[in-house]
Every structure is written in structure tokens, then in C-alpha cells.
Image (cartoon, rainbow, N blue to C red):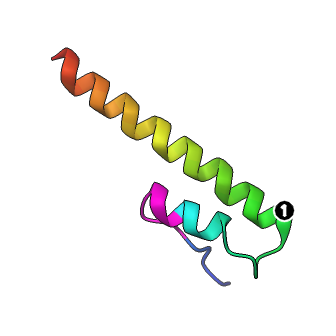
Amino acid sequence: MERPYIAADAAECKRRAEDPQLPPEERLVWAQLAVAAELKSIQRALAIRRR
């Protein structure tokens, strides 16, 4: 079984979302993952600031 591609960070997800060679449905998933990764980084930054 082939292992799924795993992005390392939000920028990589964004690059995949903007890749015109990928189907629109896959690009939408990558865009959602990019947003989720950005929100997670904001959450981490806020948690550090609160300490």
C-alpha cells in the first residue's frame, strides 16, 4: 500500500493548493490543510505568549 503524502508545514500545503496540475478537489483539501496549519501556528504562538 502506498503511503499518503504528508506536508511538513503550512507553506508546503499552500504550494500544493496552488499547483495547477492537481485536480480541483485535491487542491481544495490542500488549501484547507494550509489554513488549519496556519491556525495551529497562531494557537502555539498565543500559548507561548500567555506563559
The amino acid at mark 1 is Glu
Q: Is residue 8 magenta?
A: yes
Q: State the image coordinates of residue 8 (x, y, percent, origin top left).
A: 42, 64
Q: State the image coordinates of residue 29 (x, y, percent, origin top left).
A: 72, 56
| Identity of the residue drawn at 43% across and 59% down | 9
> Is residue 22 shown left or right of residue 42?
right
| Identity of the residue drawn at 62% across and 70% down | 16
Please say if 47 is above or below 30.
Answer: above
Q: Which residues are magenta?
A: 6-12
On the image, numbered disc 1 is attached to which residue? Answer: 25
| Identity of the residue drawn at 75% across and 76% down | 20
> Is residue 32 shown left or right of residue 51?
right
Q: Quadrant of residue 30?
A: bottom right
**Mark 1 nearby-residue class (10 Å; few <14, some 14–19, many ≥20):** few
Q: State the image coordinates of residue 33 (x, y, percent, origin top left).
A: 60, 51
Look at the image and tell me in which quarter the C terminus lies. top left
Q: Quadrant of residue 31?
A: bottom right
SS category of the residue bearing label 1: helix
> Is residue 3 shown left or right of residue 8?
right
> Is residue 47 shown left or right of residue 28?
left
Please say if 32 is above or below 30.
Answer: above
Q: Is residue 26 magenta?
A: no
Please say if 30 is above or below 20.
Answer: above
